[in-house]
């Protein structure tokens, strides 16, 4: 497939997924964008487009946001972002991906086995912190939130709205922080403009899909996403280490 066509397909599929579930753009887009762009370009492109998606949707679904939970996620993420920036700038991202992939597979297996978890204010803050670390380092805040929210059996409407509101905040903080400390390229912004029409088509289709998803289908959909993400991170990191 031509790189331009692949880019369009990635943006369409990822934006549809993000709109219909409230998460998933970075989970789907980042692995494939890494095939087309340098890691720092792929991460920043993912962050910019995720901000645009959240801005486009948040006014329509803001009444479903659980505000007390959102505040605790904000608090944790503010602590997590600086650590994520250190990973992005200095540390071994391959090792982080490998660990995250293993953790995702383990925790998703527990969720499928009906191992539930109780939501507490402290856990809300911790999950926000982990998301902050992953956003600033690899542009992928969704897995900790998704594991936590599905494990607490949160309603899909609340999950989608609260996640999108949090993404709008954490992605903006991460982008500003990266630009300040690591810089950005004009090519990233140009690619974002090219992606816009396809992003909005995906948003429209995703809204239609969301109305057709019941809670049970929604939950199993998230399991497939988590397992797929974990397998990708595992295979990609092992492959990169092995073929160095």
Image (tube, rainbow, N blue to C red):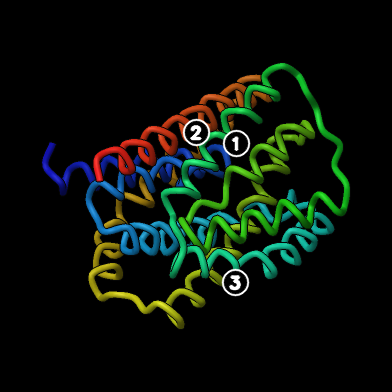
Within 10 Å of disc 3 (Cα), the crowding (few <14, some 14-19, many 20+) is some
Q: Which residue is mark 2?
A: 230
Q: Position of residue 48 (x, y in %)?
A: 42, 64
The residue to which callout 1 is attached is 103
**In the shown orientation, is residue 92 left or right of residue 8?**
right
Q: Which residue is mark 3?
A: 82
Residue closer to the observer: 120 or 214: 120
* Disc number lying in front (1 or 2): 1
> What's the CA distance linking mark 1 and mark 3?
22 Å
Residue at image coords 84%, 58%? 68
Q: How many marks?
A: 3
Q: Earlier in the sequence, mark 1 or mark 2?
A: 1
Helix or strand or loop: what does disc 2 sit on?
Answer: helix
**Residue at x-position 55% and y-position 64%:** 84
Whether residue 9 appears in this view of the structure is yes
* Mark before the other along the chain sequence, 2 or 3: 3
Q: Is residue 80 above or below residue 9?
A: below
């Amino acid at each position: 497939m031509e790189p331009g066509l692949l880019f369009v397909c990635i943006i369409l599929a990822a934006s549809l997924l993000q709109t219909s579930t409230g998460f998933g753009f970075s989970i789907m887009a980042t692995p494939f964008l890494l095939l087309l762009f340098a890691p720092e370009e792929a991460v920043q492109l993912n962050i910019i487009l995720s901000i645009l998606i959240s801005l486009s949707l948040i006014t329509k679904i803001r009444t479903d946001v659980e505000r007390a939970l959102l505040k605790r996620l904000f608090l944790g993420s503010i602590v997590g972002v600086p650590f994520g920036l250190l990973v992005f700038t200095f540390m071994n991202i391959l090792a982080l991906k490998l660990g995250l992939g293993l953790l995702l597979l383990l925790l998703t297996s527990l969720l499928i086995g009906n191992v539930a978890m109780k939501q507490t204010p402290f856990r809300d803050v911790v999950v926000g912190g982990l998301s902050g670390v992953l956003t600033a380092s690899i542009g992928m805040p969704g897995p900790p939130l998704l594991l936590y929210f599905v494990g607490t059996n949160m309603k899909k409407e609340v999950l989608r709205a609260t996640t999108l509101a949090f993404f709008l905040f954490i992605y903006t903080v991460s982008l500003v922080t990266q630009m300040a400390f690591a810089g950005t390229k004009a090519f990233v912004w140009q690619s974002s403009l090219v992606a816009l029409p396809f992003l909005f088509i995906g948003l429209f289709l995703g809204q239609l899909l969301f109305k057709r998803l019941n809670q049970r289908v929604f939950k199993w959909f998230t399991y497939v996403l988590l397992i797929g993400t974990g397998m990708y991170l595992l295979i990609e990191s092992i492959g990169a280490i092995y073929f160095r």
